Image: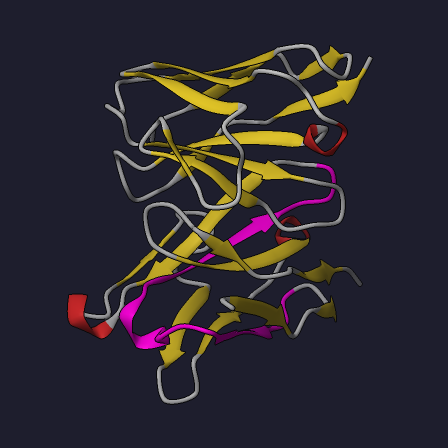
Amino acid sequence: EVQLAASGGGLVQPGRSQRLSCTASGFTFADYAVSWFRQAPGKGLEWVGCIRNKAHGGTIEYAASVKGRFTISRDDSKSIASLQMNSMNTGDTAVYYCGRGRLWVDYWGQGTLVTVSS
Amino acid sequence: EIVMTQSPATLSVSPGERATLSCRASQSVGSNLAWYQQKPGQAPRLLIYGASTRATGFPARFSGSGSGTEFTLTISTLQSEDFAVYFCQQYNNWPPLTFGGGTKVEIK
């Protein structure tokens, strides 16, 4: 069974950093791109970024709202993707989801809540 | 960036009735459109991709249509488990992927 799970959320102060992990199982992780999304409380979905698989260069794309502050990486040996978030602000408060795929996401992980507040 | 607009924001429907949800793109996205279903407290689930291809696990009462800038998601006979929020998402002009604001299908 394909499964993904995001973890690492919590309360973080403005200006500080947080690292999220996306742990996958049930498929060959190295064969797929991984995307990150977020959803502010009561709001819609926002694409955060994506990392392709190594066969497609492992290239990474970011939303303009996070570019320069967030970094996506992957460790295929552990079937884990990571989202490093720096210089966080209150606008980054959201449930963060990871998912399998680049253009559309066929499997989503349960999200993890990140709250940015002093 | 392509802006996706969904209407209506809320759709009140009785079980057994038909629901028609709309999604409009600010410029043509061809058939590069997906629909997702999201229930409270849960992650989204892929429902439709390629504008009309149903994802695994969804019954035939769900159908997607349209191309270019106008798209429709139809639920032919609403069941209790179909009450949820539905989002459309374009992947024609990427990055970024962009989503509509969602349509909440609620019980009338």
Residue at position x 54%, y 68% in the image: A3
The magenta segment is A15-42
Q: How many marks?
A: 0
Q: Is residue B21 above or below residue A51?
A: above
Going by the picture, which residue comes out furthest to the bottom?
A: A77
Relative to B36, B90 lies left or right: left
| Observer able to see residue A12 | no
Residue at position x 71%, y 60% in the image: A113
Judge by depth and name the residue closer to the eye, B3 or A107: A107
Q: Position of residue A26 (x, y in %)?
A: 47, 74
In the figure, residue B65 lies in which quadrant?
Answer: top left
In the figure, residue A87 lies in which quadrant?
Answer: bottom right
Image quarter in which the N terminus of chain B is found: top left
Relative to A21, A60 lies left or right: left
Residue at position x 21%, y 74% in the image: A54
| Observer able to see residue B5 | yes
Q: Position of residue A39 (x, y in %)?
A: 62, 46
Relative to B11, A109 lies left or right: left
Q: Position of residue A64 (x, y in %)?
A: 39, 47
Q: Is residue B23 above or below residue B1?
A: above
Question: What's the coloring here?
Answer: secondary structure
Q: Is residue A98 above or below residue B2?
A: below
Per the image, is A111 magenta?
A: no
Per the image, is A37 magenta?
A: yes
Q: Is residue A94 above or below residue A114?
A: above
Image quarter in which the C terminus of chain B is found: top right
